[in-house]
Image: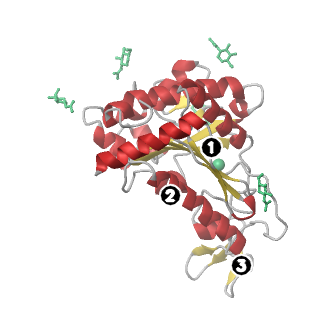
Amino acid sequence: MKDMYLFLLSTSYLLLKATGTKEVIFGHNNFTEYQVGNMNLILSVPHGGSMEPKDIPDREAACWDAKSSSCIFSHECPPGSTQNSKKCKVSTNQDRYTIELAQALAEEINEITDGFFPHIIINHLQRFKMDANREKDEASFGIPQAEQAWEEYMGFLTTAKSQMRGGLILDIHGQAHPERWIELGYTLSKTSLNSGIFSASCSSISHLASQLVNVSSETLVSGNRSLGKYIEDQNNSYVCVPSPSNPSPNNGSYYSGGYITKTFGSRNSGTIDAIQLELPQWVRAAEERPRFCKALARAVMKFWQTNYCSQYHHEFLPC
Ligand SMILES: *[C@@H]1O[C@H](CO)[C@@H](O)[C@H](O)[C@H]1NC(C)=O
Ligand SMILES: *[C@@H]1O[C@H](CO)[C@@H](O)[C@H](O)[C@H]1NC(C)=O
Ligand SMILES: *[C@@H]1O[C@H](CO)[C@@H](O)[C@H](O)[C@H]1NC(C)=O
Ligand SMILES: *[C@@H]1O[C@H](CO)[C@@H](O)[C@H](O)[C@H]1NC(C)=O
Ligand SMILES: *[C@@H]1O[C@H](CO)[C@@H](O)[C@H](O)[C@H]1NC(C)=O
Ligand SMILES: [Zn+2]
């Protein structure tokens, strides 16, 4: 039964490959977009959007409720709570050029693999309208249109995942940290990376780790089989953390992974892994982006071939 399913799946992949058509599904008002791929890789772009519909109010600081010591994500603070920009600050910065970057990365992967295309899921709303990398209440402040877009985004991720037995999500972001390095998030905290005592089985690539029984957590996250290693191998100016050059962030700025990486990766369950890519401004900029995307595509496919193809014995596309 399983083999039959796989066979049918491969046949439809080949058809897609042969015709070169790509299905694109839009959410309500085109706030979200799902480009259906034909391989076991998903690119997620939650913060690159630039749509600013007037009828969705801007997300600003939420309401602090002293009684429950919690933030209430609403544009109108319920009695007993008040707007508090210190305790209940929300992030609203767009991650510039991440949509363009994901698109260029997908094209490069398509070229290298001769016809395979990752799934691409995009939130086109400005982050100050809806944040697709947060829990629903913080993401949409109870505004029905924003909630619908959030649900559609998560629905697209779920649909893409349901088409594969195993695979990888790359959640693509941008940051402006002074280190100008590429931060790879596995939901392992800065503290645990710094201590050197961590287990990949508690990370967002937990499933991969469970398959590669003889590969240490260090090797997979910061060593010879890590994504950071393969990116740095392309050109050592693409400094990554964690990686062989920087096994841990030490005192540097570092994002370890947000809602999507935690929820849709394999940390808690499932066979689909996730890695958050936090890219510095200079690799996203127009001058560097084409070169960087070529390098990143090669690095991702190396990571794939080394770690996933051995695991799935060539049922895993493309191996
Ligand atoms: C959504 O985008 C498609 C394709 O670009 C376009 O044809 C359609 O009119 C758009 N719909 C809305 C509601 O903007
Ligand atoms: C793991 O390593 C041990 C000891 O070298 C070896 O006996 C075993 O076959 C290896 N397992 C796999 C799955 O490679
Ligand atoms: C990684 O690979 C290099 C070069 O092949 C080798 O010298 C080094 O010992 C390896 N490191 C680990 C931790 O396996
Ligand atoms: C590495 O990348 C930098 C930035 O794009 C570039 O200036 C440099 O020439 C590259 N080095 C090599 C060896 O390709
Ligand atoms: C981190 O530590 C290094 C060396 O110990 C130092 O040069 C650097 O300024 C520090 N950075 C921050 C942000 O504290
Ligand atoms: Zn982001």
State the residue in front, 306 or 221.
306
Residue 82 disc label: 3
Tell me which residue sits at (32%, 47%) in the image: 4
**Badge 2: residue crowd in 10 Å (few <14, some 14–19, many ≥20):** few
Q: Which corner quadrant holds the C terminus? A: top left
User: For the residue labelled by badge 2, is the local secondary structure a helix, a strand or a loop?
Assistant: helix
Disc 2 + disc 1, Cβ < 8 Å? no
| Image color mode | secondary structure
Q: Position of residue 152 (x, y in %)?
A: 61, 63
Residue 281, image quadrant: top right
Residue 7, image quadrant: top left
Residue at mark 1 to residue at mark 3: CA–CA distance: 48 Å
Label 2 lies in ligand 6 vicinity (Cβ under 8 Å): no
Residue 204 disc label: none
Residue at mark 2 to residue at mark 1: CA–CA distance: 19 Å
State the residue in front, 59 or 28.
28
State the residue in front, 286 or 80.
286
Residue 22 disc label: 1
Q: Position of residue 81 (x, y in %)?
A: 67, 81
Compare marks 1 and 3 and give the one earlier in the sequence. 1
Q: Is residue 41 visible?
A: yes
Q: Amino acid at mark 2?
A: Thr
Q: Amino acid at mark 3?
A: Thr
Residue 158 disc label: 2
Q: Amino acid at mark 1?
A: Lys
Left-right relation of 56 to 239? right
Label 3 lies in ligand 6 vicinity (Cβ under 8 Å): no
Q: Is residue 88 visible?
A: no
User: For the residue labelled by badge 1, is the local secondary structure a helix, a strand or a loop?
Assistant: loop
Up the image or down, 157 lies above or below 236; here it is below
Q: Position of residue 131 (x, y in %)?
A: 66, 59
